[in-house]
Image (tube, rainbow, N blue to C red):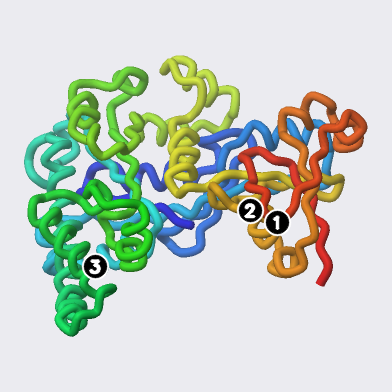
Amino acid sequence: MKAGIVGLPNVGKSTLFNCLSNAKAQSANFPFCTIEPNIGVVNVPDPRLEKLEELVEPERVIPATVEIVDIAGLVKGASKGEGLGNQFLGNIRETDAIIHVLRCFDNDNIVHVDGSIDPIRDKETIDIELQLKDLESVEKKLDKVKRAAKTGNKEAQKEEAILLQLKDGLEAGTSIRAIDISEDDRDAYVKPLQFITDKPVLYVCNVDEGAAVNGNEYVDKVKETVASEKAEVIVLAVGTEADITELDDYEERQLFLQDMGLEEPGASVLIRSAYKLLNQQTYFTAGVKEVRAWTVTIGATAPQAAGVIHTDFEKGFIRAEVIKYDDFVKYGSEAKAREAGKLGVEGKSYVVNDGDVMHFLFNV
């Protein structure tokens, strides 16, 4: 699962990406690796993993990860190929969620592509380009579906009606994620087409240091504008956090954060939010060889969770032994939780909860 960072040029996208890329920025143990120049795999900060490490004392610890993609700045006309727009839009289409960076700070030394600071205008510029690209996709699909609908095909007629609804919404400037369509119809007709504006979005308001805690007027306007989208808004002083990454000493970095009034780096908040945005949750395996956080989609069953470890685990699934994280911590070990009757034996229909400590039995 990957989240793509988008925005206009010079709003702080690459600074944010580079901030995530520096292990020193987050904690004493927060690695990052690069797959390609603009793609990074970032660990999801999770204090529960540290607690399990403390209790189990394993040989190694492996956290959950999120893939972050730094997508070059979009410009007006991108949907028509301006500024390598087709390439950028193709990169966005390949992601599962969008992190939209908005410039919410004044600085005469950093030129804005449109000459003035207006995050709402910037947001609309990006939205319009993405909507136009989706409109192009809807119209292409409609041409095919209409022919089938004319023959009396009921399924095609239903799909045509949904596509026409999407077309009307996009032409009115509404992103597909905000168009009122039932979940069943969305699953059947919308999601398979992977529209860009149907992807979940997280807005990052890039502010100066003084607004890192409480935001500013720009941030207030953004929150008001996106309220109907049910999207999360994060306030992040990206430039300041980049400065923190330059400090070699972990304690110095923590003192810098405290001076700003922050309990942890904003990048950590961002990574956890991206994880949530991707509809992901964590379960753990905990043994002396390894304590590990595994990523599963929210709503996954025990066999599906087992399949994340290995496909054979899912094929030959027999049962799962489950201890709730809080119970594991309370009793201090798997053995003591078992003695206290806190180990549950679950079958194929069990839906995994965030934080479950699991052990799978299988036979292939």
Placement of 81 over or under 207, stated as above or below: below
Residue for point 16% across, 78% down: 146
Placement of 47 over or under 95, stated as above or below: above
* Badge number at residue 158: 3
Q: Which percent across, then down, holds residue 127?
A: 18, 50
Of the image marks 1 and 2, the number of the one nearer the N terminus? 2
Q: Is mark 2 on a helix, strand or loop?
A: loop
Q: Quadrant of the C terminus?
A: bottom right
Residue for point 14% across, 41% down: 111
Proximity of marks 1 and 3: CB atoms separated by less than 8 Å: no
* Pick the front one: 286 or 23: 286
Amino acid type of the residue tagged 1 in the rendering: Lys
Residue labelled with disc 1: 348
Q: What element carries label 3?
A: helix
Mark 3 or 2, closer to the camera: 3
Of the image marks 1 and 3, the number of the one nearer the N terminus? 3
Q: Which percent across, then down, holds residue 47?
A: 64, 31
Of the image marks 3 and 2, the number of the one nearer the N terminus? 3
Proximity of marks 1 and 2: CB atoms separated by less than 8 Å: yes
Q: Is mark 1 on a helix, strand or loop?
A: loop
Distance (Cα) linking label 3 and label 2: 31 Å
Mark 1 or 3, closer to the camera: 3
Q: Which percent across, then down, holds residue 130?
A: 20, 57
Placement of 61 over or under 76, stated as above or below: above
Distance (Cα) linking label 1 and label 3: 34 Å
Amino acid type of the residue tagged 2 in the rendering: Thr
Amino acid type of the residue tagged 3 in the rendering: Lys
44 with respect to 187 (left or right): right
Residue for point 73% across, 35% down: 324
